[in-house]
Amino acid sequence: MTHPVVACPGHPVLERIPTRPAEVGEGLVIHRALPNRQRRMVGAWCFLDHAGPIQFPDGDGLKVGPHPHIGLQTFTWMIEGEVLHRDSLGYEQVVRPGQVNLMTAGNGIAHAEHSIGAGGRLHAAQLWIALPDDKRHMAPSFQNYPDLPRLVSGGFGITVLAGTAFGQTSPVAVHSPLVGMDLATGQAASTAVPADPAFEYAALTLRGEAVVEGEVLGPDTLLYLGAGRQQISVRSDGPADLLLIGGVPFAEDIVLWWNFVARSTAEIEAATRDWNGGASRFGEVAGDVGARLVAPDMSGMHLKPQRR
């Protein structure tokens, strides 16, 4: 049974939030967990899409043409399949299962993503991390992380994707106090995940069914856990894969529109004009054959900064 949501910040809660379908690239339907009406952010994590698992027909796959970002880091956790990343810094990198691709947009970058080969499988989590004010205008960068800390606890194989967990620290370079981990098992398993009381947490099942703090959690539901916890109980009666994220509640209000994270509507409008007008701010994604995405018209939009 779900406990009532406690409005007071800094306290544990159990809040079930359904994901919603969204379309990325050329017709790929994913499940979007963040942002949503109930919860805009979890720590600095401001966006979470769950793609797959899906088996593409021959000749098909992920196809996302060149598009821009500002004010954030894109964080791709690959579970199945292979995706080629190209960006305007000149990087070409295939992200493979068990790896993280991290792109820091800073003051502006463009990239494209395409499945490798014809057909095949895809299962991934795509997240964004809002950059704090003193970092959001930094120079853009990109890095692939093929070797992440891994351990076993209570039958779960745990990969530390970001931050520190179970005494293991991920090499992924982030700029806010946060954590991300993947807990996977092929059988019954049970563990207690050490938690930082200053962090707020959320969990999303990527495969199978898990029980988090007594809540049965299947795919397509984000479980917000609040803050103030010393540990988080996780168990499964069979094969399952769970994504657990957390961080210190983000202290700044942000404006999130399309692929941009900013602090004001004026910044979003400027980025939209620059991209659609072909300004050199974002550069060009050399070698990509996908159609260049167009930033949506903001006419009549009055975006208010939002937090959490």
Image (spheres, grey):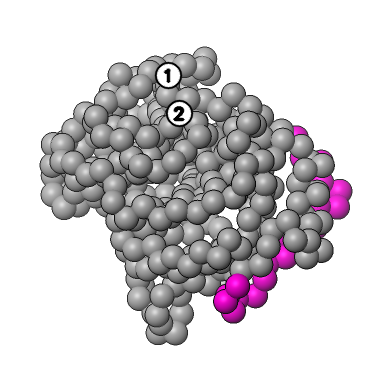
Q: Which residues are magenta?
A: 286-304
Identify which residue is drawn at 43% across, 32% down: 178
Image point (28%, 51%), residue name = 147
Type of amino acid at the residue the image marks with label 1: Ala
Expressed as whole percent of the image width and height from the top left, the position of residue 22 reads: 56, 58
Q: Amino acid at mark 2?
A: Pro
Q: Is residue 201 visible?
A: yes
In magenta segment, residue 296: yes
Q: Which residue is mark 2?
A: 177
Badge 2 crowding class, 10 Å Cα cut-off, few under 14, some 14 to 19, many 20 or more, is: some
SS assignment for the magenta stretch, majority: loop
Q: In which quadrant of the rendered view does residue 302 lie?
A: top right
Please tell me whether residue 79 is drawn above or below residue 266 in the rendered image. below
Cβ–Cβ below 8 Å for labels 1 and 2? yes
Disc tally is 2
Q: Mark number for residue 198?
A: 1
Quadrant that contains the N terminus: top left
Q: Find the residue positioned furthest to the bottom.
A: 59
The mark closer to the camera, 1 or 2, is: 2
Q: Earlier in the sequence, mark 1 or mark 2?
A: 2
Q: Quadrant of residue 231?
A: top left
Q: CA distance from mark 1 to mark 2?
A: 10 Å
Q: Is residue 148 magenta?
A: no
Residue neighbourhood size for the residue with mark 1, other residues' Cα within 10 Å, grouped as few (<14), some (14–19), many (≥20): some
Placement of 261 over or under 122, stated as above or below: above
